[in-house]
Amino acid sequence: MINTRLLHRAQWLTLGGGVIGGAIMAILVSVPSGIGVAVGSAWSAANLRAMEGLLSASLLPRDHPRDIRRVFIWVFSKLSLYVLAIWLLIVAPFPPTSLAIGLTVMLAALVLAGLTTRKDPDQTLLQRGDDADA
């Protein structure tokens, strides 16, 4: 089962970190660099949301029918985000290093969200294979 609370927290932390990092970069380096950090982190948050949607649409228990249209929509949105990223790198309206910094904000946000998100007491873990013996 996908921990959606963790992914939602990581998305919001990515957006918040991108705004803060972009403001700091705009003050210390340049305004285009600051906007690049904010755009890179917004792209990362959207990519994380598309991944969450794709996982929730495709990873279902056996007794639930899979909606192929939802899977296709999430695959299309994920591919569209990659096309946008390639366009941003080719056209280069912002410095590529600032976009890369914005992309790494998501990694820090995922770690921070993982450290601060508590597990739901209602969730039960299904043990499989070697884990069942432990």
Image (cartoon, rainbow, N blue to C red):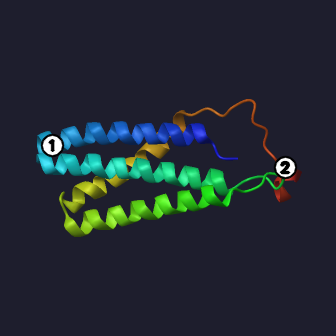
Which residue is depicted at the point 34% across and 62% down?
Answer: 84
Give the spatial CA distance, label 1 vs label 2.
52 Å
Q: Mark 1: give few (<14), some (14-19) or many (20+) Cα within 10 Å.
A: some
Which residue position holds label 2?
134
Q: Give the total of numbered labels.
A: 2
Quick one: SS at disc 1?
helix
Camera-nearest residue between 8 and 72: 72
Q: Nearer the viewer, residue 121 or 75?
A: 75
Residue at image coords 23%, 54%: 98
Residue in view at x 60 percent, y 41 percent: 4
Residue 73 percent location from the top left of the image: 55, 58
Residue at horizontal 20 percent and vertical 38 percent from the top: 23
Q: Position of residue 53 (x, y in %)?
A: 57, 50
Q: Amino acid at mark 2?
A: Ala
Q: Which residue is mark 1?
A: 26
Which x, y percent locates residue 6?
56, 40
**On screen, residue 21 above or below 131:** above
Task: Single out the residue that lies furthest toward the front.
Answer: 69
Q: Amino acid at mark 1?
A: Ala
Instruction: Give the image quarter of residue 86.
Output: bottom left
Q: Which mark is residue 114?
A: none
Q: Is residue 120 above or below residue 84?
A: above
